Image (cartoon, rainbow, N blue to C red):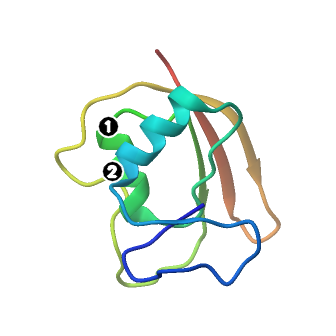
Amino acid sequence: MVLSTTLTEAPWEHTRVVNAPAADVVADLKTTGEGDILVNSSAGIIKALLSADLLDRLYLMSCPEIAGGGQRLFDDGLPATKWTLTHQETGKLGEIALVYDRAR
């Protein structure tokens, strides 16, 4: 499934395009399906899911490089939540991979 406001059809096999709020789509998937839902590199979708308290795990990567701009992932106004660090790893170039699970 691909969430998009611009695509009308997917160029990939076995893919459905959905133009709906991410929180609504994920809430529906969580009640009707099973398995994991993965969101890759979409701060807008991740923020919407954080706001709706629909995320159970966060994979974060911190790289020792200053990009100088970009969208913030953790904006002001998100609800307060608690997370537990479940895994961390440091790479050869100083990058840090962190995995947090939602503490409920």
Q: What residue does disc 2 label?
A: 48
Query: Front-most of 77 and 66?
Result: 77
In the image, residue 21 sits, relative to residue 27, either above or below, namely below
Report the residue at 76% width, 72% height from top: 93
Report helix, strand or loop for mark 1: loop
Q: Where is residue 41 in the image (x, y as percent from the top left)?
A: 55, 67
Name which quarter of the figure residue 68 lies in. Answer: bottom left
In the image, residue 60 sits, relative to residue 32, either above or below, namely below
| Distance from the alpha carbon under mark 1 to that under mark 2 | 6 Å
Q: In this view, does 93 lie to the left or right of 19?
A: right
Identity, as a three-letter code, of the amino acid under mark 1: Ala
Q: How crowded is mark 2: few (under 14 residues within 10 Å), some or many (20 or more)?
A: some
Q: What residue does disc 1 label?
A: 52
In the image, residue 23 sits, relative to residue 20, either above or below, namely above
Report helix, strand or loop for mark 2: helix
Q: Where is residue 104 in the image (x, y as percent from the top left)?
A: 46, 15
Q: Where is residue 57 in the image (x, y as percent from the top left)?
A: 58, 36
Residue located farthest toward the left when viewing the structure as drawn: 77
